[in-house]
Image (cartoon, rainbow, N blue to C red):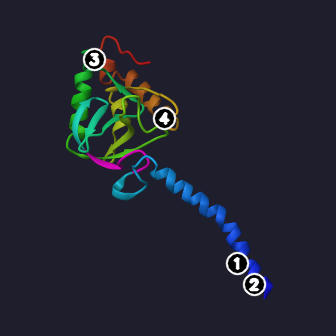
Amino acid sequence: MNGSRVRPALAAALLRPALAAALLVTAACDADGRGGGSGGAGRCGPETATVSRVIDGDTVELSSGERVRYLLVDTNELSSNDCFATEARDFNVSVVAGREVELTYDEECTDDFGRLLAYVRVGDRDLNALLVERGYACVLFIPPNGTERVDELRALERIAESERQGMWGACEEVACD
């Protein structure tokens, strides 16, 4: 009889740390107010959303009002009237404007301007890779984000440059870091 009482007590003692750890993880996921699963919200922001406005070649505004800066890519600046900036924006408009997009996040959720940092997909199209592959964008690697995909996008950038795609063939000078 004593043996049967010891076993439940032992089991409870072993389960307490696991239960405490699970509660801490749940609390951490909800600490930023974005929750861990209701309404399609992930750790950083929405997993799917509709693009209400294209700001430029690498930034959009969602119907929620949140802005998303595409990870690992940098297009030329409209405000500086850079070569191929308008073409990059127009391409972005043609792919995402008014459409539902899938957003995938990396280590850091936002940049210094409060924009969400994400990889963006429309259907089966990976927009981050497509912008680089077609010569609309350079690779912009700011660790810790992008560590797993930077080599893939750099390879696409080398091919775009060698084939003179987009800005690589249209611009006298391309200022990639």
Residue beneath disc 2: 4
Distance (Cα) linking label 2 and label 4: 52 Å
Marks 3, 1: nearer the viewer: 1
The location of residue 37, given as percent across then percent down, is 40, 57
Residue beneath disc 3: 170
**Disc 2 residue type (three-letter):** Ser
Distance (Cα) linking label 2 and label 3: 80 Å
In the rendered structure, which disc, 2 or 3, sits on the residue that comes first in sequence? 2
Distance (Cα) linking label 3 and label 1: 74 Å
Looking at the image, which residue is at 43% across and 55% down?
Answer: 36
The image quarter containing residue 138 is top left
Q: Residues within 10 Å of mark 4 (few under 14, many from 20)?
A: some
Tell me, for residue 145, which label it has, or none. 4
- Asked whether residue 43 is in view, the answer is yes
Residue 108 is a magenta residue = no
Bounds of the magenta segment: 42-50
Name the one closer to the observer, 46 or 177.
Answer: 46
Marks 1, 4: nearer the viewer: 1
Label 1 sits on a secondary structure element that is helix
Looking at the image, which residue is at 26% across and 27% down?
Answer: 88
In the rendered structure, which disc, 3 or 1, sits on the residue that comes first in sequence? 1
**Disc 3 residue type (three-letter):** Ala
The location of residue 21, given as percent across then percent down, is 60, 57
Q: In which quadrant is the C terminus drawn?
A: top left
Distance (Cα) linking label 2 and label 1: 7 Å
The location of residue 96, given as percent across then percent down, is 25, 40
The reply to whether dot 2 and dot 1 touch (C-beta < 8 Å) is yes
Distance (Cα) linking label 3 and label 4: 30 Å
**Disc 1 residue type (three-letter):** Pro
- The secondary structure that most of the magenta stretch takes on is loop
Residue beneath disc 1: 8
